[in-house]
Image: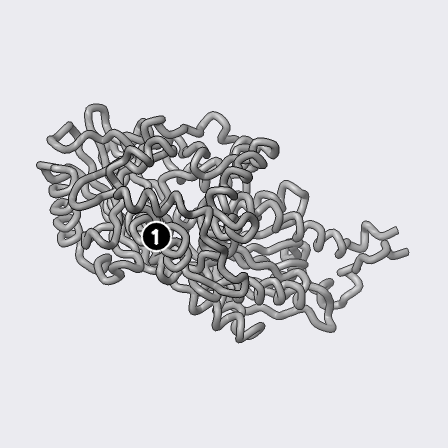
Amino acid sequence: MLLAGRRVLSQFPLYQMFDSHYKKDAVIIGGGISGLAIAYRLQRAGLNILLVEKSARVGGALLTEEIDGFLVDCGPNSTLETSPEIGHFMDEIGLQGRRIYANPSAKKRFILKNGNLLALPMNPFQFLACRLFSIQAKLRLLAEPFIPAAPEELEETIAQFVRRRLGKEFLDYAINPFVAGIYAGDPARLSVRSAAAKIYALEKNYGSLVKGAIKVAKQRQKMSETSKTKARLFSFQNGMTELANALAEILANSIQKRSILDRVELPGASGDFYTLSISQKTKRIKIAAKSLIFATPAHVTAGYLKSIDKSLSAKLQKITYPPVAVVFSGFKKQVPCRPLDGFGFLVPRVENRRILGTIWNSAIFPNRAPEGGFCLTTFIGGMRQPDLPQLDDRELGELVFDELKDVMQLQEKPDVLHIKRWEKAIPQYELGHQNSINEIEKLETEHPGLFISGNFRNGISVGDCIVQSKSLSSKIVDYCTKCVPESEVA
């Protein structure tokens, strides 16, 4: 008899035509952190999976290189432990002894104002005493609890929201630089509802950011959650690539690199499975999959969806990914410059500089520079100046040195200069982004077994992708268990 509510794939003739090697419970397209985390969870749940990656390596933006004694993270240099789930995940995959936490001094962040690096206040007392904001700006912030909430139907940009609730100076010297540091974005284009959902929720649920923050902090204590301002920053002894390498080792027998998905045939009369045509270097294979997961950037996913849902494909294609150049400067010995006594600094747009900010890598984590040396990473481009990453290496190196000479009083050029350009760096959650997410959910409902993941959905950070992979993997496992092989039917 059939198990109630379950479909038996082997009753369909075309499914029987595939060799067992080419039958999969789940095929994941894309080997970045989203795809790797989902693949790991599905394999751990007992599913027969395949991860398809077009390049020669997995990990996506998780890329660390060792250059002349320096450890160079070309993408994310760290992530925040905002949820216990992130730590549990690291322990599960064998990285419990490899994590390193940021130096406590790295909590100190600097903002460039009028050519000077000023510390960002971390508590109310520091805020009242700090030089970063004027007396007028401080008084304006204290008035925030008395400002009425906007109509729920109004979708505001981050800039509109912050200007309304906190004032222009706070927008210019707090929010603008942090949006550039996190998204390489422009607060005048990002949707507060999508890109700063937790902040938006404070106004929506409590009518005030200040009142809401106090109440949410109490709730977090009860639920053992950690806010991003208090979450611990961590990396790994050999850089962020360790995370990708650990997952790749676990999934070694389930990864196909240098492979491209050419064609997708949707489930039809032949059965509830997806027929995939995948090109490899010397051959093309066909795979029957109960579920198909796209874990690629929005513009790549858009190409796969073009024949399935043109409207959603067009929306995903329009999600902006600005270019960013990551410029690493390594010094083998100490040279004259300001003290590296924090995480680094961010640059507001109103300062009219050619860099977004600089991280002081060797001050944050050990083992990033040879003994006696130090290293910095500077970010250029983003939505603010998208043409600058196109400069050649010499020009970018000179640009960074000129800026750091002025801002940090750096007197000598680096011994090691390494540049990584990301042509499409970080997805921008702009106005209307939620409409695209709603259409994704609609597509997943209309096409059972089809799932879409990636950092353009529900958070851009490494930690966000790991947390999201848990809920999505649970849905995939639930779906796949509805399609059982004939041998399991009594």
Residue tagged by mark 1?
A: 167
Res 283 visible: no
| Whole-percent x, y for residue 192 in the image | 45, 56
Question: Going by the image, does 139 lie left or right of 36?
Answer: left
| Residue closest to the far left | 411
Residue nearest the observer in this picture, 381 or 92: 381
Question: Going by the image, does 255 lie left or right of 241?
Answer: right
| Whole-percent x, y for residue 328 in the image | 24, 42
| Whole-percent x, y for residue 37 in the image | 54, 45
Residue nearest the observer in this picture, 227 or 128: 128
Q: How was the colour assigned to the protein in this rendering?
A: one colour
Residue lying at 63% horizontally and 41% vertically, measured from the top left: 44
Q: Look at the picture and state if 138 lies above or below 158.
A: above
Q: Look at the picture and state if 309 lies above or below 422.
A: below
Residue lying at 50% horizontally and 71% vertically, measured from the top left: 313
**Mark 1 crowd level (few <14, some 14–19, many ≥20, 10 Å Cα):** many
Residue lying at 26% horizontally and 50% vertically, measured from the top left: 348
Q: Quadrant of the N terminus?
A: bottom right
Q: How many marks?
A: 1
Residue lying at 38% horizontally and 55% vertically, measured from the top left: 426
Q: Look at the picture and state if 177 lies above or below 81.
A: below
- Quadrant position of residue 130: top left
Residue nearest the observer in this picture, 177 or 138: 138
| Whole-percent x, y for residue 482 in the image | 76, 55
Question: Going by the image, does 128 lie left or right of 467?
Answer: left
Q: What is the secondary structure assignment of the residue under circle 1?
A: loop
- Quadrant position of residue 191: bottom left
Three-letter amino acid code at the position of disc 1: Gly
| Residue closest to the far right | 1
Q: Look at the picture and state if 14 lies above or below 80.
A: below
Res 40 visible: yes
